[in-house]
Image: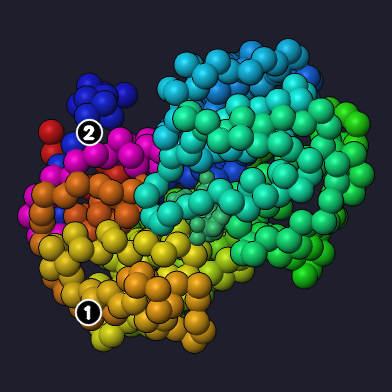
Amino acid sequence: MNSVLEKKNRSDILKICGGRPLKGEVVVQGAKNSLPKIMVASLLTKAPCILKNVAPIKDVEIIRELISALGGKVQNIDSTSIVMETPKMSLVPAKRLEDFSGQSRIPILLCGPLLARLGEAIVPSLGGCQIGTRPVDFHLSALRSLGAKITETPYGYHLKAKKLYGNKIHLDYPSVGATEQVLLASVLAEGVTELSNAANEPEIIELIAVLQKMGANISVDLDRVINIRGVSELKGFEHSAMTDRLEVASWACAAIVTNGKIFVKHATQLDMMTFLNKFRQIGGEFDVKDDGIFFWRKSKDLKSLALETGVHPGFMTDWQQAFVVALTQADGVSVVHETVYENRLGYVSTLNHMGAKIQLYQECLGSHFCRFGQRNYLHSAVIVGPTQLKSAAIHIPDLRGGFSYVIAALAAEGISTIQNIQLIYRGYGNFIEKLVHLGADILE
Ligand code: EPU
């Protein structure tokens, strides 16, 4: 890596001179919302577990450190593969735990493995992007149903259970994290757990596949019901993680917003179908190859549309932000109804500052009412386009909002200064190298 890039990678500020189309190839690795959970699954066994296609992202680093703090070892096999082994495990002291508090949402998923192996778990209070209240009530209530006694402490949660027992659990909303919690806690519980209204995102199906490789007995029904028959022991696994479909969508949007053409290596069509349909509807085009997907703008003018985010197989809430930047370039009025997080449109005020015309509404501007309607949450957006974006001094509020600002800056007239870019490394490995490689004008 050259010294300018090294300096940029350490810096928390990125300066982009907009106006250049992004052209070329980017390689996307394992999914941010999959890798850390598979790493947590490795704690369910004493045997070595091999994980391939590991992306160089902050969330992976955090779980690596947590596994080490618990007494396990994580070693690199090569630049994208690791082996994890935790033959002995002990609780992380409360003092050490404070280092992890507020950094990530993954540590709450340690409950199952720690209870199974130690009969006790201490997990830090949670971090992650500030995009809503993000409670963990479903997690706690599911763990209680399986037999855990939980107390809240100043540094997080303290759980105890000599043994967990299978039970019937219903989620009020198909939460990704709570579904993963139930999976990781019930695979080694005694008896059968029936989880209804479960999330079924591809990242969850991947976690189930890994658990199956380990010896777990899990069946998934079409009606969002997952049955887990507990087993007494699990073995190690070897697994190559699925491609990050959120990063793929981000580069696809960068291609059409800058009027360039990007080949996203390792992008997979099957996990992206809903996105691809909407992408084509607004005037984007793609060509699926065996080893990735080309993305570009088909027509000179992009077209407006109405869109609702939702649970799988709907349009992902994490695709929404970069797509909204594309909609600022579309001809006419677009409507986006965010139904997963109540506060995931806060980032648009900065886009307006850059010249976009986006108005937020409390009403559900979609084909159905969601949990946030009439509850004072600005969760619907009306976007009027096309607008010429202009440069600005920007502060990144959260991961996906942050990457959408990068895309806006790439299309804007003039030099934008973006602060807090370290947040983007939580989910986009080597993103500055990738931008430079695609021809972005990144200033020193
Ligand atoms: N919810 C509750 N109670 C709970 C759990 C969730 O009310 O106990 C609510 C949340 O407040 C939210 C909704 O349920 O309104 C969905 O939350 P979910 O649990 O599905 O989200 P998560 O597991 O915390 C993961 C991803 C998010 C992604 C969502 C939805 C990880 C580490 N995070 O979060 O990713 O947006 O699923 O697909 O997997 C991102 O990558 O930028 C990101 C935020």
Figure colour scheme: rainbow
For disc 2, the neighbor class at 10 Å (few under 14, some 14 to 19, many from 20) is few
> Label 1's element?
strand
Q: Nearer the viewer, residue 291 or 198?
A: 198
Specify the label residue 207 is tagged with: none
Residue 97 % position (x, y)? 50, 22
Q: Is residue 352 left or right of residue 267?
A: left
SS label for mark 2: loop
Residue 303 in view: no
From this view, report whether residue 119 is shown above or below residue 269.
above
Left or right: residue 293 versus residue 396 is: right
Q: Position of residue 166 (x, y in %)?
A: 85, 46
The answer to whether residue 395 of the structure is visible from this angle is: yes
Query: Residue 136 at what x, y percent from top left?
Result: 56, 48
The verdict on residue 426 being magenta is yes
Examine the structure image and report whether residue 112 is included in the region drawn in magenta.
Answer: no
Ligand 1 is within 8 Å of the C-beta of the residue at disc 1:
no
Residue carrying label 2: 12
Nearest to N terminus: mark 2 or mark 1:
2
Task: Check whether the beta carbons of the residues at disc 2 and disc 1 lie within 8 A of each other.
Answer: no
Q: Amino acid at mark 1?
A: Gly
Residue identified by numbered label 1? 385
Q: Residue at x 23, y 59 (%)?
A: 408
- State which region is magenta: 411-434
Q: Is residue 166 left or right of residue 152?
A: right
